[in-house]
Image (tube, rainbow, N blue to C red):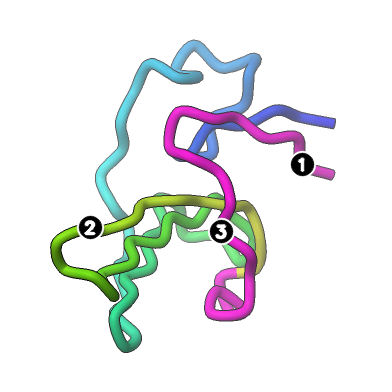
Amino acid sequence: MPIIDMYGHESTSEFFRKKKEMAFEIVKIGTKNYVRYENKPECAITCVDETNADDQKVSWTHGAWDNKENLTYDHAPSETINID
């Protein structure tokens, strides 16, 4: 199982936890902004939740971009995750 950071860099990459990426696409739905850094159907996705303007939450997950609204975003930006 590969381990990735919030930008989708695998642990074997020289960029793992070292390089920030420019967003490829940002979609705003309601009070949430969804960000992906690669043009792939399955990728690392960041969610910026602006429900409370004074306390914005940033979290991420890996999954299908087309299903971004239904994914569970429970990883802090500093965390890495295992993907299948």
Q: Residues within 10 Å of mark 3 (few under 14, many from 20)?
A: some
Image label count = 3
Q: For residue 83, which numbered disc appears in the image?
A: 1
Q: For residue 4, which numbered disc appears in the image?
A: none
Give the spatial CA distance, label 1 vs label 3: 14 Å
Residue type at the position of mark 3:
Tyr
- Residue to which mark 2 is pinned: 55
Question: Measured from the top left, where is residue 38 in percent x and y?
Answer: 45, 52
Q: Nearer the viewer, residue 38 or 47?
A: 47
- Report the side of 77 relative to 25 (left or right): right
Q: Residue at x 53, y 79 (%)?
A: 69
Dot in front, 2 or 1? 2
Q: Is 69 drawn above or below residue 54 in the view shown?
A: below
Circle 3 sits in a helix, a strand or a loop, which is it?
A: loop
Q: Which residues are magenta?
A: 65-84
Circle 1 sits in a helix, a strand or a loop, which is it?
A: loop
Whether 77 is among the magenta residues is yes
Residue type at the position of mark 2:
Asp
- Report the side of 37 relative to 16 (left or right): left
Whether 64 is among the magenta residues is no
In the rendered structure, which disc, 2 or 3, sits on the residue that comes first in sequence?
Answer: 2
Circle 2 sits in a helix, a strand or a loop, which is it?
A: loop
Q: For residue 73, which numbered disc appears in the image?
A: 3
